[in-house]
């Protein structure tokens, strides 16, 4: 029958061995499941980017659009504090946008102090030749456009009553700028428009 002490030792060692094998198996399963999950996430991301390339564009452009909106607004405010007037002279409030792109392009030449599609003598509106606004890559060919290829909308308070009517509402201030946003539709600051007066 053998030595009982030896038998007990053998039994304990066999149990330990079994436990060790089980633990190794569990580790192997865990690693396998983790790898499957990671591969699934990567595959899902690749599929999403292929299925919705437009969405990626929106994600890329959103930070750029508010930055440009603010830059235009700041450049006009800086112009005003430099020259004591706004960079246009129609005596009544005016909106620069795609619909009157000649005026828009001339205004942007005055602010950037750089010839663009407006083809104007920008020195007339900016006699000190100060570059209030940096140009963007597309500027000289396409004009100062937003990330979706549209001109921004710029409202100036040219009757100097510190009020500008935008859409159905009046806003207090002298300079308002917005992009028509990803849908490319001018919604007078509503919808997905990206506005200087909204965070
Ligand atoms: Ca006004
Ligand atoms: Ca819009």
Image (cartoon, rainbow, N blue to C red):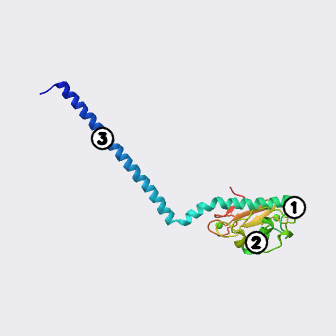
Density class for disc 3 (Cα within 10 Å; few <14, some 14-19, many ≥20) is few
Residue at point 78%, 75% (across, down): 119
**Which quadrant: the N terminus?**
top left
Q: Is residue 26 above or below residue 53?
A: above
Labelled disc at residue 68: none
Disc 1: which residue: 83
User: Of callouts 2 and 1, which one flags the residue occurring earlier in the amino acid sequence?
Assistant: 1
Q: Position of residue 108 (x, y in %)?
A: 77, 68
Tell which of 109 and 154 is nearer to you.
109
Q: Which residue is mark 2?
A: 116
Query: Spatial distance from mark 2 to mark 1, Cα to Cα?
Result: 22 Å
Quadrant location, the C terminus? bottom right
Q: Is residue 30 visible?
A: yes
In the image: residue 124, left or right of residue 118: right
Q: How many numbered marks are there?
A: 3
The mark closer to the camera, 2 or 1, is: 2
> Mark 3: which secondary structure?
helix
The residue where tag 3 is placed is 22
Residue 170 position by quadrant: bottom right
The residue depicted at 66 percent of the width and 64 percent of the height is: 193
**Pointer 2 with pointer 1, Cβ within 8 A:** no
- Circle nearer the N terminus (1, 3): 3
How many neighbours does mark 1 have within 10 angstroms: few (below 14), some (14-19), or many (20 or more)? Answer: few
Residue 86 left/right relative to 98 = right
Q: Are marks 1 and 3 in contact (CB under 8 Å)?
A: no
| Residue 170 shows up from this direction | no
């Amino acid at each position: 029958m053998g030595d009982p002490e030896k038998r007990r030792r053998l039994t304990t060692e066999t149990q330990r061995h079994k436990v060790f094998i089980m633990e190794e198996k569990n580790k192997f399963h865990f690693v396998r499941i983790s790898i499957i999950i990671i591969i699934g996430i990567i595959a899902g991301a690749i599929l999403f980017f292929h299925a919705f390339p437009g969405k990626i564009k929106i994600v890329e452009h959103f930070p750029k659009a508010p930055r440009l909106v603010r830059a235009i607004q700041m450049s006009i405010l800086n112009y005003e504090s430099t020259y004591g007037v706004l960079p246009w002279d129609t005596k009544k409030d005016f909106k620069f946008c795609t619909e009157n792109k000649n005026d828009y392009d001339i205004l942007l030449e005055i602010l950037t102090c750089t010839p663009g599609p407006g083809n104007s003598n920008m020195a007339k509106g900016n006699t000190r030749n100060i570059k209030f606004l940096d140009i963007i890559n597309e500027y000289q060919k396409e004009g100062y456009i937003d990330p979706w290829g549209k001109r921004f909308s710029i409202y100036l308070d040219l009757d100097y009553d510190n009020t500008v009517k935008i859409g159905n509402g009046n806003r207090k201030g002298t300079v308002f700028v917005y992009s028509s946003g990803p849908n490319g539709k001018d919604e007078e600051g509503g919808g997905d428009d990206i506005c200087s007066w909204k965070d």
